[in-house]
Amino acid sequence: AQDPMVVAGRCLLAVNAGSGTVSSFSIDSASSISLVGTYATGEVYPMPISVAEKDGLVYVLNAAGSGSIQGFTLSNGCDMSPIGDLIELDQGGAVSPTDPPSGLATPTEVGFTPDG
């Protein structure tokens, strides 16, 4: 299953496939969140579909092209900063606005192993 949203401490992270971004929110209370920032996850039409966080490291999986991963650090205040360059995957698929992902030839989820 894809994880388009994840809670990390007092932060909520959500991918926005339509705009090629990931948004970070501060969880203020059980009924209130505040937008901290919105961050690009790739270059032209990246189509982020999954996000994972562990110990302040965040990775976003993009399905466009043959897939890519963008890393971020997550601060205690829910602000995110990119880590290095986009990591391109060679999955043999090609996804674009006219050729949507099939789930067979494109990556579908990013995550961490239990030991990090």
Image (spheres, grey):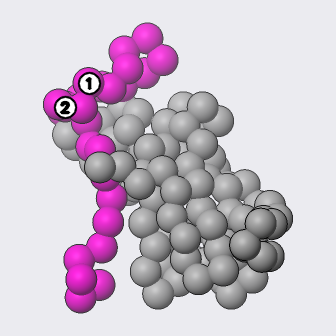
Residue at the far front in the pictured view: 30
Would you say 74 lies left or right of 35 here?
left
Name which residue lies at 63% across and 66% down.
Answer: 12
Q: Quadrant of residue 73?
A: bottom right
Under tag 1, what secondary structure?
Answer: loop
Name which residue lies at 77% across and 76% down.
Answer: 29
Q: Amino acid at mark 1?
A: Ser
Q: How many marks?
A: 2
Q: Is residue 94 magenta?
A: yes
Q: Is residue 18 magenta?
A: no
Would you say 107 lies left or right of 3 here?
left
Q: Circles 2 and 1: CB distance less than 8 Å?
A: yes
Front: mark 2 or 1: 1
Mark 2 to mark 1: distance in Å? 7 Å
Q: Is residue 57 placed above or below 2 in the rendered structure? A: below
Under tag 2, what secondary structure?
Answer: loop
Residue span colored magenta = 92-116
Q: Amino acid at mark 2?
A: Ala
Of residues 31 and 60, the one nearer the viewer is 31
Numbered circle sitting on residue 116: none
Of residues 11 and 96, the one nearer the viewer is 11
Residue at the far top in the pictured view: 98
Q: Is residue 84 placed above or below 115 in the rendered structure? A: above
Q: Which residue is mark 2?
A: 105
Where residue 45 appears, as percent x and y from the top left, is 54, 31
Name which residue lies at 75% across and 82% down.
Answer: 77
Q: Which residue is mark 1?
A: 102
Is the magenta region chiefly helix, strand or loop? loop
